[in-house]
């Protein structure tokens, strides 16, 4: 568990490569069809309303042609008035049907995008922590904001309009053929735009995927620069970061210029193609009218029908760019379900959570590390090499060693953030990386020197670890880690934290995280320099408080300050990814090996000097 006191998911690490996956076009289509099936009745209603609206719109040109033929044939005013009244009624009907079709489409879109957001949230929370660390927050943030916003806008606005325009287009072509099959052939002039459409579609999807990836990379760069602004300033890296930012912006501009070029070719070409049927029907209609093959009213009706084609064609063209962009965005959103270690989520269906089977429940609290090898990605050297270790229930084990020895990596494997390349890490005989997160949360918690304060009150932050905890338990947890400042807050547990509220310093944030660990009440706690941000006196006070609270539990402390090792039951010494030594503090100092060298170096004494600390002090550096 990180200092947020949220259990690390028990998932295997993803395959090598930092980028989050993108769904294939086939997988994206299947996901879209699943969303449609979930709300199938609403989708069918949209189709019916759009068809009725398009059908009502066909009456106008046909009635106008009848009026022309009636006037030319000497018909009376009453006939013309009756046809005009029917035309008005049909226009009003089309208006109402179109309104309700769009209303139904908007409701369908909002419900569907809500399901997309829920599924994205579920998948994000199920991501292995290692995956998030390696891919960075920029890509994940972009998918959860800009990409989902693009999908939402498309479902709410573009899809209803494209449905209506597509139905209108088909009905108009059918109406021209009904008025006059010969004039209906003029509608084939629209096919002149097909080469441009095919050319565009072959290039649009990868172009918009590249644009999304460039936007994610820029967001990641900006987030990292903002988070490390003080370090950038202290090390004089401003120019280097500015250069990197300009390069990322140039890539974004290049990808967007590419998609703009594709639109600049498509739109004018299809605009011209949409005018060809009108020109053709006027020319062919004039010839046929002169020969008496068709009536003037038929020519007028066919011309109006084909002229109306421009509106749905323009709508489809205008929205086609958005559909391609949102299709790429949906592929990125849906691709999150293809991340190794997660299960593609289906639309939410409330059901009780199954109880874990006997094979997934640890038999006891014993932790065994057997012949473990681990490397960060394929093709990299092993960080851990053949580590064997058994941690007994209730034991206090300290893991020490020089930087890069593999201490923190071992801690990540113990808590299931990563899975070994070979060998096994088990708790109670069950593989840690295979445990359900809810089961793992009750077994092992990892606390690192990183910390996070969530927006909300102190109570909200603490109840992340124990939703049902009462105020007495919350106060006790804060007292257990020495968070005396909590009693001085103006609104007590109801004090708002974060932006717009009280801002905690690093020490207070870490104590809040440690209080969440107390509330989580696991049987094993792994401390990876969990008190590193506290001053020595406060850190020692917090460690003693935690020692009292965690008495009887297994505590694995990954430490650089060797007083932690002195207080432990056993000390595991890591060197070069291997377990070099294992034993009590006194045994290892007496053996004169790697731990003894670390101990003497930490105390600033030569190896021949007395090594024992002051009796009973257990204190840090003298």
Image (tube, grey):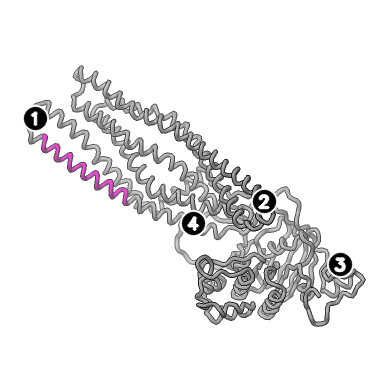
Earlier in the chain: of badge 4 and badge 1, it is 1
Disc 4 or disc 3, which is closer to the eye? 3
Task: Name the image quarter holding residue 72.
Answer: top left
Q: CA distance from mark 2 to mark 4?
A: 40 Å
Earlier in the chain: of badge 4 and badge 3, it is 4
Disc 3 or disc 1, which is closer to the eye? 3
Task: Give neighbour class at mark 3: few <14, some 14-19, many 20+ (Cα, 10 Å).
Answer: some
According to the image, label 2 marks what residue?
237
Disc 1 or disc 2, which is closer to the eye? 2
Q: Residue farthest to the right?
A: 608
Q: Secondary structure at mark 3?
A: helix
Task: Give neighbour class at mark 2: few <14, some 14-19, many 20+ (Cα, 10 Å).
Answer: some
Q: Nearer the viewer, residue 343 or 219?
A: 219
Earlier in the chain: of badge 3 and badge 2, it is 2
Q: CA distance from mark 4 to mark 1?
A: 64 Å
According to the image, label 1 marks what residue?
75
According to the image, label 4 marks what residue?
119
According to the image, label 3 marks what residue?
597
Q: CA distance from mark 1 to mark 2?
A: 87 Å
Which disc number belongs to residue 260? none
Tell me where the magenta segment starts and ends, as one range. 80-103
**Answer yes or no: do the residues labelled 1 and 2 have beta carbons within 8 Å?**
no
Which residue is found at the position 38% from the left and 50% from the top?
A: 156
Q: Secondary structure at mark 1?
A: loop
Q: Secondary structure at mark 2?
A: loop
Earlier in the chain: of badge 3 and badge 1, it is 1
Image position of 614 (left or right of 487): right
Quadrant of the snapshot with the C terminus: bottom right
Q: Position of residue 96 (x, y in %)?
A: 24, 48
Q: Secondary structure at mark 4?
A: helix
Earlier in the chain: of badge 2 and badge 4, it is 4
Q: Position of residue 2 (x, y in %)?
A: 63, 66
């Amino acid at each position: 568990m990180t200092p947020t006191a949220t259990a690390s998911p028990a998932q295997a690490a993803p395959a090598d490569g930092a980028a989050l996956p993108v769904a294939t076009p086939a997988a994206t289509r299947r996901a879209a069809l699943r969303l449609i099936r979930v709300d199938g009745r609403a989708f069918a209603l949209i189709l019916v309303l759009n068809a009725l609206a398009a059908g009502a719109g066909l009456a106008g040109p046909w009635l106008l042609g009848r009026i022309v033929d009636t006037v030319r044939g000497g018909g009376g005013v009453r006939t013309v008035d009756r046809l005009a009244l029917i035309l008005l009624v049909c226009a009003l009907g089309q208006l109402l049907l179109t309104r309700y079709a769009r209303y139904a489409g908007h409701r369908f879109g909002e419900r569907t995008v809500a399901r997309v957001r829920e599924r994205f949230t579920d998948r994000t929370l199920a991501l292995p922590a290692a995956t998030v660390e390696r891919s960075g927050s920029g890509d994940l943030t972009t998918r959860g904001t800009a990409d989902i916003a693009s999908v939402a806008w498309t479902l709410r606005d573009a899809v209803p309009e494209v449905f209506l325009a597509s139905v209108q287009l088909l009905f108009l072509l059918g109406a021209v053929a009904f008025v006059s099959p010969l004039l209906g052939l003029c509608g084939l002039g629209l096919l002149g735009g097909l080469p441009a459409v095919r050319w565009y579609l072959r290039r649009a999807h990868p172009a918009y995927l590249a644009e999304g990836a460039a936007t994610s990379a820029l967001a990641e760069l900006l987030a990292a620069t903002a988070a490390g602004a003080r370090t950038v300033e202290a090390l004089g890296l401003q120019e280097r970061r500015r250069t990197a930012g300009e390069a990322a912006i140039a890539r974004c501009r290049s990808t967007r210029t590419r998609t703009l070029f594709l639109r600049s070719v498509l739109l004018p070409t299809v605009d011209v193609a949409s005018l060809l049927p009108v020109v053709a029907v006027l020319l062919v209609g004039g010839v046929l009218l002169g020969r008496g093959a068709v009536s003037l009213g038929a020519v007028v009706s066919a011309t109006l029908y084909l002229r109306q084609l421009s509106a749905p064609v323009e709508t489809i063209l205008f929205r086609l760019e958005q559909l391609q962009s949102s299709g790429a965005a949906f592929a990125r959103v849906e691709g999150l379900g293809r991340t190794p270690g997660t299960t593609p989520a289906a639309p939410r269906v409330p059901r009780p959570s199954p109880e874990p089977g006997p094979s997934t429940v640890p038999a006891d609290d014993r932790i065994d590390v057997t012949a473990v090898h681990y490397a960060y990605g394929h093709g990299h050297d092993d960080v851990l090499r053949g580590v064997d270790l058994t941690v007994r229930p209730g034991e206090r084990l300290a893991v020490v060693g020089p930087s890069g020895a593999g201490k923190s990596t071992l801690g990540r494997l113990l808590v299931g953030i990563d899975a070994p390349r070979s060998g096994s890490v088990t708790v109670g005989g069950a593989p840690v990386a295979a445990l359900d997160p809810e089961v793992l949360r009750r077994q092992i918690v990892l606390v690192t020197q990183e910390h996070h304060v969530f927006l909300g009150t102190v109570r909200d932050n603490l109840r992340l670890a124990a939703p049902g905890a009462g105020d007495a338990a919350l106060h006790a947890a804060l007292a257990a880690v020495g968070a005396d400042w909590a009693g001085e807050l103006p609104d007590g547990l109801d004090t708002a934290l974060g932006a717009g509220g009280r801002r905690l310093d690093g020490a207070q944030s870490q104590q809040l995280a440690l209080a969440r660990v107390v509330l989580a009440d696991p049987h094993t706690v792994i401390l990876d320099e969990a008190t590193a941000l506290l001053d020595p006196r406060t850190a020692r006070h917090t460690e003693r408080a935690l020692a009292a609270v965690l008495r009887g539990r297994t505590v694995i402390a990954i430490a650089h300050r060797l007083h932690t090792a002195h207080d432990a039951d056993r000390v595991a010494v890591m060197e070069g990814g291997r377990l070099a030594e294992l034993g009590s503090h006194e045994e290892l100092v007496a053996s004169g090996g790697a731990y003894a060298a670390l101990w003497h170096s930490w105390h600033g004494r030569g190896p021949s000097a007395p090594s024992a600390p002051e009796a009973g002090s257990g204190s840090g550096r003298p």
